[in-house]
Image: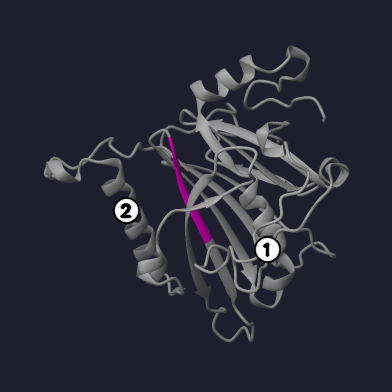
Amino acid sequence: MRRLLFVIILALAATPALAQDKDSNKQGELPPGVVGSGAITLQQLTEDLQFLITEKYGIVVAFVLPRGWELVEQGIDPKTGKLREDLNVYSVISRAPVAKKGDPTDLIFELHIFKRGLLEDLPKNTKPEDKTEAVQFRNFLDEQLGINLKAGLKCLTKAADINAKPYGPPTRPKTYFVPIFYEVPPPPDSGGKGSMLYTFTSVAGNKIWMLKFLVSKDQVDNYGALIAFVLDNALAMTKQQYEEQLKNMPKDKQPASPGKEGAKP
């Protein structure tokens, strides 16, 4: 499996304890039953988590996953190793490990970065008042909601609660995600309990990026803290902002260029 990402220590890893406030879930910011991501020591972070970063379509996204989880890219030409021009979204997918090969996983993580900018390629009949990033972002959310509903998912997030909410430690500016939660029915005649889909959508520059977590219903409580921790440590910036960040880091601490493997922390 081709490795696309490199290990990095940025501001997202600046604090060893990233516990959420006990009331942070009042407005549905995290899966039900989650109080917080818990305090994790710096030693645990470096031993048990991998810090990852990828740059596509002019933005850089940094995030964390448990160490050892394999990553698969979608949207990369396997022959050239370059981004395919005919696709409109780049994706990174990872699954929770299973005891036996072939067993179904109980958590799937996805990162999506969308190619089209919010104000790019708008229909010619778009009204002047709709040519704003805020309106186009809301249109994107409505489109995603419609796609999921047509696929048979049940939206559990009230329309009034579909708003941007801050995530992240106090050591850096917050990342604003719009969380929308869905109930996913089991396949017909499967006898399964179904799953929960948690989506978190954000913008960097004028590009949309999204984190998704598909979790078996009977494992929501077990994975809630991990989901909260991943969200607290996810951030994105433009490529220019990222390069400015690098200028303030000693050369021996700088990661490799996006897409290449960097030094272990």
* Label 2, residues with CA under 10 Å away: few <14, some 14-19, many ≥20: few
Task: Give the Cα distance between marks 1 and 2.
Answer: 28 Å
Q: Position of residue 173 (x, y in %)?
A: 55, 39
Q: Amino acid at mark 1?
A: Leu
User: On the image, which quarter does residue 148 sit in?
Assistant: bottom left
- Residue 105 shows up from this direction: no
Q: How is the image coloured?
A: one colour
As for residue 5 lying within the magenta part, the answer is: no
Say if 222 sits above or below 44 in the image. below
Q: Secondary structure at mark 2?
A: helix
Residue in the picture at 28% in, 37% down? 119
- Residue type of the residue flagged with mark 2: Arg
Residue 11 is situated, as x and y percent measured from the top left of the image, at 66, 33
Q: Position of residue 171 (x, y in %)?
A: 65, 38
Q: Quadrant of the N terminus?
A: top right
Left or right of residue 247, residue 7 in this image: right
Magenta highlight range: 199-204
| Residue at the image point whose x is 11% and y is 44% from the top | 125
Q: Specify whether 166 is left or right of 150.
A: right
Residue at figure coordinates x 40%, y 62% from the top left: 162
The disc at residue 75 is: none
Residue 73 visible in this rendered orientation of the protein? yes
Rendering quarter of residue 51: top right
> Which is nearer the N-term, disc 1 or disc 2?
1
SS assignment for the magenta stretch, majority = strand
Q: Residue at x 73, y 13 (%)?
A: 251
Q: Nearer the viewer, residue 242 or 80?
A: 242
254 sits to left or right of 131: right
Q: Label 1: which residue?
A: 107
The numbered mark at residue 138 is 2
